[in-house]
Image: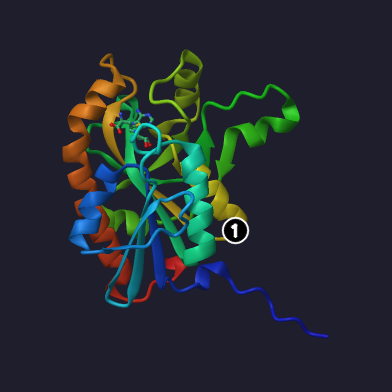
Amino acid sequence: MHTAPDPDPAETTIERVAVLYALASEAEPLIERLMLAEQPAVDPALRPRHFAGTVGTLHVDVLVNGPDPRCGTDRVGTDAATLAAYMTIRKLAPDLVLNAGTCGGFAARGGTVGSLYVSEGPLLYHDRRIPIERFALQAAGRWPATPAPRLAAAIGARPGVVSTGNSLDATDDELAFFERERVSAKDMEACAIAQVCAQCGVPFVAVKAVTDLVDHPEPVQDAFLRNLRTVCALLGERMEAGVRWLAAHPRRVGEL
Ligand code: SAH
């Protein structure tokens, strides 16, 4: 008996892209630029906000985690990101998932406020300490991202190692980890989304814009709050260019 070979994932044509954001202020510029319309909540219990539209023949979904019901702040970090990614994949069936947002950068790797990075190589977790050898890989994450050099060029982003944790600041151990692993972008969501995408077989790329520098004496929260608006405007402009590149003609995953 003959069985059909599994389709080559690199040959998948990207007809539907989903862009996941943690903060409303990160997502708003792209939603406005692409004139996406708000949709009913994909899952009423979790309530990430859902916006959708088309660019040419490309269907675009934007998911924003939405506020914590208790305090009203945007839901950041790996819990909300994991749920949003799984819900998006199951209910909206994207051919490609992007996670766009802000990040901490590193002057040691040439980062400055406004630098843009596209995930290169596996994504990491920097705050999971499980000192039992068999658990080392689970702790470190190392979930794959889809290589995307042409998408990066369309966005005007450079390749960089992205690492995720659930804190805005960093411990001394984590600072040593960033040097060891040559991390360029420190965020709170990307590796969690990469993990869901890898297990569900959906291509994944992170796009991160630097709001603050981790290896700088100024507390990251001060730089983050001061630069958030301008960096999100820049991210929106570059994400629009990326989405328009994806929509210019049908792109295969292997062409990213
Ligand atoms: N006080 C902020 C909270 C944002 S938390 C507010 O006003 O909403 C930081 C968010 O930006 C996360 O979603 C994270 O992915 C990203 N981020 C930016 N700089 C970061 C850094 N230095 N470390 C970790 N995450 C960072």
Q: Residue at 33% across / 28% down in the picture?
A: 106
Q: Residue at 40% across / 38% down in the picture?
A: 69
Ligand 1 falls in which quarter?
A: top left
> As drawn, which residue projects farthest toward the right?
1
How many other residues sit within 10 Å of disc 1, few (<14), some (14-19) or many (≥20)? few
Residue 256 is at least partly visible in this image: no
- Figure colour scheme: rainbow
Q: Quadrant of residue 54?
A: bottom left
Total numbered labels placed on residues in the image: 1
Q: Nearer the viewer, residue 235 or 35?
A: 35
Give coordinates of residue 94: x percent, y percent: 46, 65
> As drawn, which residue projects farthest toward the bottom?
1
Say whether mark 1 is within 8 Å of ligand 1: no
Residue 101 is at least partly visible in this image: yes
Give coordinates of residue 220: x percent, y percent: 30, 22
Q: Nearer the viewer, residue 138 or 188?
A: 188
Amino acid type shown at disc 1: Cys
The vertical placement of 208 against 108, above or below, is below
Quadrant location of the C terminus in the rendered image: bottom left
Give coordinates of residue 222: x percent, y percent: 24, 21
- Residue corresponding to mark 1: 200
Q: Residue at 37% across / 62% down in the picture?
A: 40
The vertical placement of 233 against 172, above or below, is below
Quadrant location of the N terminus in the rendered image: bottom right
Helix or strand or loop: what does disc 1 sit on? helix
Give coordinates of residue 232: x percent, y percent: 22, 43
